[in-house]
Image: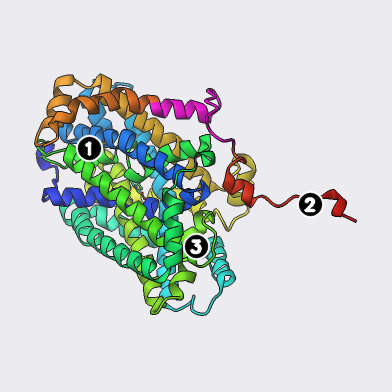
Amino acid sequence: MAQQRGHWGSKAGFILAAAGSAIGLGNIWKFPYITGENGGGAFVIVYLGCIALIALPILIGEIIMGKTTQQSAVPAFRELSRPASPWMGIGWMGVLAAFLLLSYYAVIAGWTMHYVWLALQGTFTGLDAEGVNNVFNESAASPGLNLSWLVVFMALTTFIVAGGIKRGIELASRIMLPLLGLILLALMIVAATSAKGGFSQAVDFVFSFRADQLTADGVLEAVGHAFFSVGVGMGTMIAYGSYLKRKSDAVGTSVLIVGLDTVIALMACMVLFPITFAYGLEPDAGPGLVFKNMPIALLALPGGSFWAVIFFVLLFVAALTSAISLLEVATSYVVDELKWSRLKAAFIGGILITLVGVPSALSNGSHWFNEGFADITGKNWLDSVDYLVSNIMLPLGGLGIALFVGWRMSKSIRQSAFSEGSGLAATYGAWCFLIQWLAPAAVLIVFLNAVGILDLGIFAEPGDTQAEIEAAPELVDPDDLE
Ligand code: PFF
């Protein structure tokens, strides 16, 4: 079977596809809004620490598992341990996580397509902040719109994955990723030149450390987002790594992928926040941040409609290269395990995920999936699934992968897979320490603290942070009341 397996056309092709998987809505839609919600600086620094010390070592581990076994996650666990090994459960959880993640990811990606369409028609021209808010609220709440765009986006994703590794995924990434880098750079220059005052405020917001803003939930969110953004913890990179030749370099490419992912996330903040501050908008607008703030600011620029179209094309492209890697997790699992053809696996997987995405598409427009569900979990369906996948399943999967690679996999296979083709072989000892001890311990401690089993007492309580205190309504002096 290994002989018939597709392979990347080149090292650059793999790096672009893997970076395309990592760089997505997580960088441009989610990172800025959770940074905004968690008060900026301190959250960003914790996040960067999680990227370097937890996500990067696990990414190297996933790629090593893939290239060594030439198999996707579930069979890779089997081959590196034994048949019917309980470790395979981590692979299955990954397939489930990819399924769930793509089911709501595709809904947000649908919003980006809808916004390209709206911007092309000039819908935002002449609208004030309230008008743009209304457009977002109405679009997000419309069942018909959400369902239609979900189907269109999933169809595109499915066609690319069905096209195969070299002609589908690699080709799409080769075209789309450089395009994304260029667009983001252009927008950053526009933001720096047109929103000058906002730019320095944004730098201060994103980079100054305000420890009093950190909550335990914020730290869990930083850990979860590091997994989400790099795309580790569910075996995506085991699958992508399995299309590498055995001798390929896992370490250097991982450093490059994580570096690109982080630079793009910070660049996205440097587009979004200068504009947000320059126009007096709020940085903590939540999931609607890019959809509410960007049109207002972009349309105020010379050639505004053009920039608005470009921005939402950027978001769409980023979403598509990530979505194909998510569908690839399920596809490669079925191809490897059930020996289905790629075409059949991609189409059936695509259809099932679209169906699972229906409640997410209805999350803002149907009472049941919105308030009804919020009565149970405190969040609507889409946000609840996001919380479950990002903050629970991915860190747990990452913990499992770290423990497996660090303690269960054969030492000699591990060491040679790490060193082969790599100029960074000397870092093997440091990497072993991170993957055996630091990454598992960090994930475990943050988890236990977040669920209340362990009270570290070093973080602010929710409600205590400066942003929340400032946002709280002012108390009225009872004497002032009649
Ligand atoms: N990394 C992607 C993003 O930041 O949008 C999302 C993602 C892709 C998560 C692939 C997980 C994954 F396996």
Q: Residue at x 18, y 30 (%)?
A: 427
**What's the residue at 23%, 56% (across, down)?**
173
Relative to 434, say whether 201 is above or below.
below
Relative to 392, say whether 44 is above or below: below
Which residue does the numbered mark 3 point to in the structure image?
Answer: 277
Q: Which mark is residue 476?
A: 2
* Amino acid under disc 2: Val
- The disc labelled 3 sits on which kind of residue? Phe
Residue linked to disc 1 = 336
Residue 294 visible to an observer of this rendering: yes
Q: Mark 3 or 1, which is nearer the eye?
A: 3
Label number found at residue 248: none
Can you give x and y, in whole percent of width and height, for residue 384 in the image?
Answer: 52, 43
Position of residue 312 in the picture relative to residue 364 (left or right): left
> Mark 3 falls on what kind of element?
helix
Residue 455 included in the magenta stretch of the image: yes
Tag 3 near tag 1, CB within 8 Å: no
Query: Residue 227's image quarter?
Result: top left
- The quarter of the image holding the C terminus is bottom right
Task: Name the residue type under label 1.
Answer: Asp
